[in-house]
C-alpha cells in the first residue's frame, strides 16, 4: 500500500515537474535549468490579442507566441519558414504561392488550412472589422485591398485564394521586392473562423482563444499580466522549452528595473539616462541594440501655417546644424543611440546609410555654418528668431527639448519655447497643422527603408510637416519596383538634408536587462521581433 | 429620515443624468479621439471605426442611446481600446481590486488617523501631541509617488519580504504595500482633522462639565467627546472613501495591480469614451451614495440635525 | 405691524453694532493670543524664511534656474553633488542645471499655488458650504448635488478644454486649482453648519430677526474658523502636488521652469541612482514649508476659537 502510494506520487511528481524535453536543449545540447518559467516586462497593457485588431508592440509580442504566420524572423531579422514551408513567385513577380505546413494544427485540434489565412486577410480589410491595420495589405499591394476597406468591393474580391488546403495564392498589383518580408507581421496571420463565429469580439479571451502558435492563452488581466502556457498541439512542441510565459505590465521603468533587481522579472528595461552606471554594475545582463526607430523634430511647412521664419530652408538648416546630437546622446540618453544626420536608420535591412554633407563636419564647423546661414536669412541679435516647439508630456522629451532650447539659445541666439501637451492634444495639433515645430518619432512597420522614406512623400497620410517635393515623390515611386532601390534612397535622403523639412536627431537603440541564464533572445533584430518559443534557461 | 433618504435617491437620477451629459460634452469637446494615433490612421479606417462604434451619430442621439442601453440592458458599451473587453468587463476586473486595497487602506487610515488625532488632542502640547503631529505631517508630505518606490526598495529589494508588484487575485503579500502607499496621506489628514475637532469639543461646556464632575478621562472621551468630534471627520471620510476604493493611479502603476485607478486615467488619455463614462458614472454613484450615508450619520451624531 | 418691523430693524441694527464691537475685540484678542503662542510664532518665522528663500534665493545663487551646463549634463552623479566651491549649493539636476536656483524658483510657484488654492477654498468653500447648510432644504439639495457632480466629473477634460480655449498660461493653472480646491471644504463646512444652526445662540439670533446673511457671516462663519484653518493647511500640500498633474497636461508650469512637485517627482525617480540630493532638497523644503503652515494654522485655530474666549 505504502509502496503503491509512493509510486503514484513519484509518477505524478515526475509528470508534473520534469519537462518532457528532458534537461538538455535539443538544438544546442546545453544543460537546462529546472525552472523554465519566463517573466518579462511590458511598458503598457496589451490592448488586443486579435491579430487583425492588434496595434501595439506589446500586443504583437504576445500574438507571435499564440499564432503563427506564414513566415517568421530569425535572430538577425531574415525570414524563415513557419506556417508555410516555402513559396513560389510567378515570372511576372506579381503572384506569390505559399505552401503550408501540413502538420500545423490549431489549439482546438483542427488542421491549419489555406482558408484560415484567406479568412484572416478578408477579415482584416473588411470595413465591418474596422481594423487599424487594414491599410497593411494595401501597402503590400494586395489586389483590391484598398477598395474593400473603402467599401467599394466585397471582401471576396481580395487577391488571396486557397488553391487547396495547403496552397495559398496571393496576387499583388505591382512587383514588390520586400513583399515576403511583410509576411511576418501579425496582420497577415491566420484566424480561426470557428472561434470568431462562436465568441464574437470575446474570442480573444482566455478559454476562448484558438491559435496555432507555440503557446495558449491562460490569463489576461488588463494592467496586471498576461500568462501563456505551452501548447500541446503546436507542430514543433517538442522544441518549445519555456513555459509559462508571463508578461507583466509596469508603467514605470524605474519600478520595472527595481523588480528585475529583486528577481521578479527575467527581462526588463534600463531607466533612461542610467545606462552607463548600470551597465558597469551589470555588464553581462545589460545590452543596447540598434532599433528601427528615428526621433525627430518636424517643421510645419504648410502654406500659411507654422512660423514664417521656419519656412526658409536656410533657417531650418541652421537649426539642424546647431543641434549637437552628441550631447543629446552622450549626456541625456546615454544608451548608445546613434546620432541622426539622415532620416532612415542605418540598421534597416539592405539600406546603405547615405553620407549627408553635414554628417561629416565637426560640431564647430556646423555651428559656424549655422550662424552664417541664419544671418543670411536675416535673423540676428536685433531680429531674433522666435518660435514654439510642441512635445507630448514625458520626462525624456522634456529633457531633450530643454537641452536643445539651450543649444540654440547659446549658439544662435534663437528663442525656442518648448510647450508640453497631453499626448492626445499634441497628436491632434500635429495632425491638424497647429504647430511651428513638433517632436515626432517613427518606427518601422517592416524591415525596409521605404517604411521610413515614404513618410515624407506629398501623398503620405502621415506627412505632418507637409513637405512637398515632386522630385522626392518620383524617387520613391520609382524605388518600389527597382531591384536595388538604394541609389534612389540616397538621393531622397540628400533632398531631405537640403530642404530640411525635419531635423533628424537620433536613431533608437533598444536597451534591455536580461537575467544571465536566459538564452535565445535575438540581439541583432532591428524590429526587436522575438519569439518566446526560442527562449530557454540554462542550468548554472 | 426614511422619507429623506428616498427623496435623495430620487434626486440621484437627474444628478446622474446631468453628470452623463456634462461628461459627454467635455469628452467630445476635448481634442483627440479614441482613434487618434501618432501614426495617423487612413481616413477610411477612421470612418469604419466610427461607424462600428456608433460615433457618427449626433451627440444628443449618442447620449440617448447610451442611457437607453444602460437602463434597458445594463450595457455600458464596449471599450474602444481593449478590443475584447466591454466596460462591464473592465470594471468587473478593476473595481474588485481597488475595492479591496481601498477598503483596507480606508480602515487603516481611519483607525490610525482618528487614534492619533484623539491622542494628540487629549495630550495637547505634550510630547505625545508633537509626535502625533510630526508623524502626520511627515506622512502627508510623502506623496505616494515617493512612498511607493521607497516601500519597494525596502521591502522587496533589501529585505525581500514582499513582492514588488502584481495582484494575484488579492493575496495578502500583494496587498500590503498598496494599502500603505494609499493610506498614508489620508491617515495624516484624518489625524489632523480629528485633533482639531477634538480640541474644540474638549473645550465645550458639556465636556467641561463632565470633567468637572470628576469622570475619568477615557470615559469622557469615549462617551461624550468622540461622537461630536467625529462630525467634521465624517465630512472628510465620505469623499475620501470613494477616492480610495476607486483607486489610485500611482498605486496601480507602481504595483501592477490592474485596478480601476489606472484604467480610468488610461481611458482618459486614450479617449476611450465608453470606459471613461462608465468609470465616471461609477464614481458619481459612489459619491452620491456615500455622501448620503454621511448625511444619515450626521443625524446619528447630532440628532438635532434636520434636513 | 409697521411699528414692530421698525422695532425689529432697530434691534437688529443694535445687535449688529454690538457684534462689531465684539468682533473687533475678537480680532485683537486673537492677535494677542497668536503672539503668545511660541509654536505659531516659530511657524511664522519658518514660513517667512521659506518665502524669503523662494523670492530671494535666485539672487543668492551664481547660477540661473534654466542654464544647462553641458559639461555636467548627464554626469550629475559624479560631478553634480552639492558643493559650495562651484556655487551649486544644492547640487545640479540631470541636465546640469543648478538645483538651488531651481528649488527657489519651484518653491515660489508652489507657494503661490498652495496659498491661492487654500485662500480660494477658504473663501468659496466656506461661503458655499455655510449657505447650503444654513438654508437647508431644497437649496441644500441642489447646492450639494452640484458638488457631487463636480467631484465626479472627469476633471482632466475640464483642464484640457481650458488649455484649448485659453492657451498655456500660469493664470489658467490658478483657475484650475481654484476650481478643484473648494469642493471638499464646502462639504466639511456644510456638515458643521448643519449642526451649528441648531445651537442656542443661532436660534436666538434667528428669533430676534437677524437677517440670514448676517447670521451666516457673524455667527456661523466665525465658529467654523477652527476646522477651516486646519483643512486649509491640509489643502496646501495637496494643491502643490495637484499642480504637477495640471502641468503634466500642459496647462501650468512650462519647462524650463519647474515646481516643487515636479522636482520631487524627478528626484524620486532617480533616488537609487546616486543623486539623492535631487530628492532631499526639494522634499526638505516641502516638509519645512508644511510644518510652518501647520504651526501657523494651528496657532490661528487656537487664537480664533470663539469658545476659548
Image: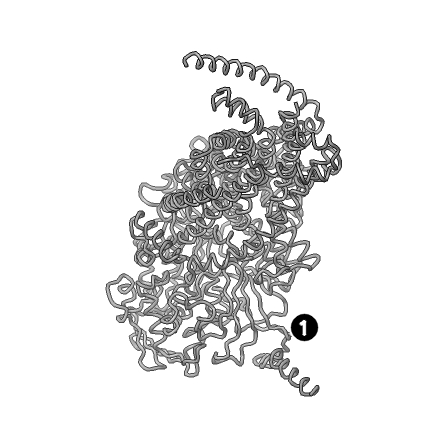
Q: Does C2 sit left or right of C303 as displayed?
A: left
The image quarter in which residue C43 lies: top right
Residue A395 vertical position relative to residue C206 in the rendered view, above or below:
below
Q: Element type at marker 1?
A: loop
Q: Is residue A388 visible?
A: yes
Give whichever of C288, A512 is nearer the camera: C288
Q: Position of residue C75 (x, y in %)?
A: 63, 48
Q: Is residue A318 visible?
A: no
Q: Does A204 sit left or right of B63 as displayed?
A: right
The image quarter in which residue A264 lies: bottom right
Task: Count the marks.
Answer: 1
Give whichever of C115, C85 is nearer the camera: C115
Colouring method of the image: one colour
Give whichever of A219, A88 is nearer the camera: A219
Q: Position of residue A527 (x, y in %)?
A: 47, 64
Dot 1: chain letter: A
Q: Position of residue C279 (x, y in %)?
A: 64, 44
Quarter the N terminus of chain A occupies? bottom right
At 73% from the left and 30% from the top, the residue drawn is: B212
Q: Position of residue A327 (x, y in %)?
A: 55, 48
Please tell me how crowded label 1 is: few (under 14), some (14-19), or many (20+) other residues with Cα within 10 Å: few
Residue placed furthest toward the front:
C1
Quarter the C terminus of chain A occupies? bottom right
Residue A153 vertical position relative to residue A453 in the rendered view, above or below:
below
Query: Which residue is tagged 1?
Result: A540
Give whichever of C281, B60 is nearer the camera: B60
Q: Does A142 sit left or right of A108 as displayed?
A: left
Amino acid at each position: 500500500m505504502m509502496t503503491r502510494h509512493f509510486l503514484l506520487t513519484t509518477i505524478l511528481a515526475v509528470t508534473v515537474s520534469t519537462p518532457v524535453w528532458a534537461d538538455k536543449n535539443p538544438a544546442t545540447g546545453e544543460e537546462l535549468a529546472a525552472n523554465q518559467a519566463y517573466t518579462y516586462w511590458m511598458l503598457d497593457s496589451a490592448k488586443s490579442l486579435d491579430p487583425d485588431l492588434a496595434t501595439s508592440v506589446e500586443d504583437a509580442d504576445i500574438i507571435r507566441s499564440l499564432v503563427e504566420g506564414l513566415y517568421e524572423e530569425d535572430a538577425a531579422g531574415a525570414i524563415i519558414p513557419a506556417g508555410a514551408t516555402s513559396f513560389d513567385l510567378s515570372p511576372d513577380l506579381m503572384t506569390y504561392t505559399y505552401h503550408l505546413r501540413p502538420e500545423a494544427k490549431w489549439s482546438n485540434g483542427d488542421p491549419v488550412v489555406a482558408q484560415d489565412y484567406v479568412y484572416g486577410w478578408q477579415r482584416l480589410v473588411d470595413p465591418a472589422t474596422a481594423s487599424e491595420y487594414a491599410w497593411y495589405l494595401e501597402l503590400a499591394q494586395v489586389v483590391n485591398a484598398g477598395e474593400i476597406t473603402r467599401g467599394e468591393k466585397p471582401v471576396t474580391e481580395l487577391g488571396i485564394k486557397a488553391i487547396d488546403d495547403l496552397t495559398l495564392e496571393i496576387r499583388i498589383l505591382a512587383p514588390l521586392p520586400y513583399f515576403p518580408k511583410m509576411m511576418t507581421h501579425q496582420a497577415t496571420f491566420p484566424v480561426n473562423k470557428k472561434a470568431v463565429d462562436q465568441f464574437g469580439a470575446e474570442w480573444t479571451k482566455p478559454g476562448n482563444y484558438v491559435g496555432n502558435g507555440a503557446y495558449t492563452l491562460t490569463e489576461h488581466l488588463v494592467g496586471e499580466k498576461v500568462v501563456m502556457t505551452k501548447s500541446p498541439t503546436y507542430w514543433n512542441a517538442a522544441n518549445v522549452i519555456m513555459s509559462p510565459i508571463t508578461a507583466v505590465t509596469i508603467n514605470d521603468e524605474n519600478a520595472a528595473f527595481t523588480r528585475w533587481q529583486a528577481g521578479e522579472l527575467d527581462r526588463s528595461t534600463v531607466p533612461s539616462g542610467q545606462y552607463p552606471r548600470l551597465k558597469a554594475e551589470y555588464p553581462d545582463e545589460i545590452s543596447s541594440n540598434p532599433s528601427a526607430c528615428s526621433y525627430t523634430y518636424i517643421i510645419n511647412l504648410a502654406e500659411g501655417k507654422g512660423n514664417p521664419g521656419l519656412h526658409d530652408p536656410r533657417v531650418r538648416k541652421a537649426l539642424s546644424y546647431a543641434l549637437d546630437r552628441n550631447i543629446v546622446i552622450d549626456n541625456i540618453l546615454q544608451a548608445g543611440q546613434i546620432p541622426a544626420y539622415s532620416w532612415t536608420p542605418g540598421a534597416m535591412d539592405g539600406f546603405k546609410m547615405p553620407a549627408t554633407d553635414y554628417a561629416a563636419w565637426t560640431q564647430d564647423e556646423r555651428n559656424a555654418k549655422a550662424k552664417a546661414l541664419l544671418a543670411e536669412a536675416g535673423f540676428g541679435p536685433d531680429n531674433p528668431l522666435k518660435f514654439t516647439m510642441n512635445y507630448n508630456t514625458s520626462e525624456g522629451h522634456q529633457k531633450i527639448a530643454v537641452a536643445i532650447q539651450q543649444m540654440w539659445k547659446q549658439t544662435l541666439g534663437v528663442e525656442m519655447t518648448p510647450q508640453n501637451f497631453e499626448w492626445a492634444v499634441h497628436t491632434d495639433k500635429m495632425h491638424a497643422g497647429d504647430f511651428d515645430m513638433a517632436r515626432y518619432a517613427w518606427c518601422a512597420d517592416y524591415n525596409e527603408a521605404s517604411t521610413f522614406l515614404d513618410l515624407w512623400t506629398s501623398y503620405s497620410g502621415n506627412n505632418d510637416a507637409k513637405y512637398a517635393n515632386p522630385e522626392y515623390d518620383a524617387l520613391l515611386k520609382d524605388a518600389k519596383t527597382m531591384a536595388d532601390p538604394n541609389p534612389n534612397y540616397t538621393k531622397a535622403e540628400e533632398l531631405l538634408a537640403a530642404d530640411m523639412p525635419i531635423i533628424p536627431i537620433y536613431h533608437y537603440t533598444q536597451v534591455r536587462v536580461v537575467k544571465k541564464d536566459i538564452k535565445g533572445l535575438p540581439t541583432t533584430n532591428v524590429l526587436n521581433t522575438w519569439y518566446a518559443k526560442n527562449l530557454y534557461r540554462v542550468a548554472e | 429620515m426614511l422619507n429623506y433618504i428616498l427623496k435623495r435617491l430620487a434626486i440621484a437620477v437627474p444628478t446622474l443624468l446631468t453628470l452623463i451629459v456634462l461628461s459627454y460634452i467635455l469628452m467630445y469637446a476635448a481634442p483627440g479621439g479614441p482613434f487618434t494615433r501618432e501614426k495617423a490612421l487612413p481616413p477610411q479606417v477612421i470612418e469604419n471605426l466610427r461607424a462600428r462604434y456608433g460615433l457618427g451619430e449626433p451627440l444628443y442621439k449618442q447620449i440617448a442611446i447610451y442611457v437607453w442601453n444602460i437602463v434597458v440592458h445594463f450595457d455600458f458599451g464596449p471599450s474602444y481600446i481593449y478590443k475584447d473587453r466591454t466596460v462591464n468587463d473592465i470594471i468587473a476586473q478593476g473595481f474588485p481590486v481597488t475595492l479591496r486595497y481601498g477598503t483596507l487602506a480606508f480602515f487603516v487610515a481611519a483607525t490610525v488617523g482618528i487614534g492619533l488625532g484623539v491622542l494628540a488632542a487629549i495630550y495637547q502640547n505634550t510630547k505625545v501631541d508633537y509626535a502625533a503631529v510630526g508623524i502626520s505631517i511627515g506622512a502627508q508630505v510623502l506623496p505616494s509617488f515617493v512612498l511607493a518606490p521607497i516601500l519597494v526598495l525596502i521591502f522587496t529589494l533589501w529585505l525581500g519580504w514582499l513582492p514588488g508588484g502584481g495582484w494575484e487575485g488579492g493575496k495578502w503579500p500583494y496587498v500590503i504595500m498598496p494599502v500603505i502607499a494609499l493610506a498614508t496621506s489620508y491617515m495624516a489628514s484624518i489625524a489632523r482633522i480629528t485633533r482639531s475637532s477634538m480640541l474644540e469639543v474638549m473645550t465645550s461646556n458639556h465636556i467641561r462639565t463632565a470633567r468637572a464632575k470628576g469622570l475619568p478621562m477615557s470615559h469622557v472621551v469615549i462617551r461624550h467627546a468622540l461622537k461630536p468630534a467625529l462630525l467634521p471627520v465624517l465630512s472628510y471620510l465620505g469623499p475620501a472613501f470613494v477616492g480610495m476604493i476607486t483607486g489610485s493611479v500611482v498605486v496601480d502603476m507602481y504595483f501592477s495591480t490592474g485596478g480601476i485607478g489606472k484604467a480610468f486615467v488610461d481611458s482618459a488619455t486614450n479617449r476611450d469614451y465608453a470606459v471613461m463614462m462608465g468609470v465616471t458614472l461609477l464614481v458619481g454613484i459612489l459619491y452620491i451614495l456615500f455622501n448620503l450615508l454621511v448625511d444619515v450619520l450626521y443625524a446619528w451624531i447630532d440628532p438635532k440635525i434636520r434636513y | 405691524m409697521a411699528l414692530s418691523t421698525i422695532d425689529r430693524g432697530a434691534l437688529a441694527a443694535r445687535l449688529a453694532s454690538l457684534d462689531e464691537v465684539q468682533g473687533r475685540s475678537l480680532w485683537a484678542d486673537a492677535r494677542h493670543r497668536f503672539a503668545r503662542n511660541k509654536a505659531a510664532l516659530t511657524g511664522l518665522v519658518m514660513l517667512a524664511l521659506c518665502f524669503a528663500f523662494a523670492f530671494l534665493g535666485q539672487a543668492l545663487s551664481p547660477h540661473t534656474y534654466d542654464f544647462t551646463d553641458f559639461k555636467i549634463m548627464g554626469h550629475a552623479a559624479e560631478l553634480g553633488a552639492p558643493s559650495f566651491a562651484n556655487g551649486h549649493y544644492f547640487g545640479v539636476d540631470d541636465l546640469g542645471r543648478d538645483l538651488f536656483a531651481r528649488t527657489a524658483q519651484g518653491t515660489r510657484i508652489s507657494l503661490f499655488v498652495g496659498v491661492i488654492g487654500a485662500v480660494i477654498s477658504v473663501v468659496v468653500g466656506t461661503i458655499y458650504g455655510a449657505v447650503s447648510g444654513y438654508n437647508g432644504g431644497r437649496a441644500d439639495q441642489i447646492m450639494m448635488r452640484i458638488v457631487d457632480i463636480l467631484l465626479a466629473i472627469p476633471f482632466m477634460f475640464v483642464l484640457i478644454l481650458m488649455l484649448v480655449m485659453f492657451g498655456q498660461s500660469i493664470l489658467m493653472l490658478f483657475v484650475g486649482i481654484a476650481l478643484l480646491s473648494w469642493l471638499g471644504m464646502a462639504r466639511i463646512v456644510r456638515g458643521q453648519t448643519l449642526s451649528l444652526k441648531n445651537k442656542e445662540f443661532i436660534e436666538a439670533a434667528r428669533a430676534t430677526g437677524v437677517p440670514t446673511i448676517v447670521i451666516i457671516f457673524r455667527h456661523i462663519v466665525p465658529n467654523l474658523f477652527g476646522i477651516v484653518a486646519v483643512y486649509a493647511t491640509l489643502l496646501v500640500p495637496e494643491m502643490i502636488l495637484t499642480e504637477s498633474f495640471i502641468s503634466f497636461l500642459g496647462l501650468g508650469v512650462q519647462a524650463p521652469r519647474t515646481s516643487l512637485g515636479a522636482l520631487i517627482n524627478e528626484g524620486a525617480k532617480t533616488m537609487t541612482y546616486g543623486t539623492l540630493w535631487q530628492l532631499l532638497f526639494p522634499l526638505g523644503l516641502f516638509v519645512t514649508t508644511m510644518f510652518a503652515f501647520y504651526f501657523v494654522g494651528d496657532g490661528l485655530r487656537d487664537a480664533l476659537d470663539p469658545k476659548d474666549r
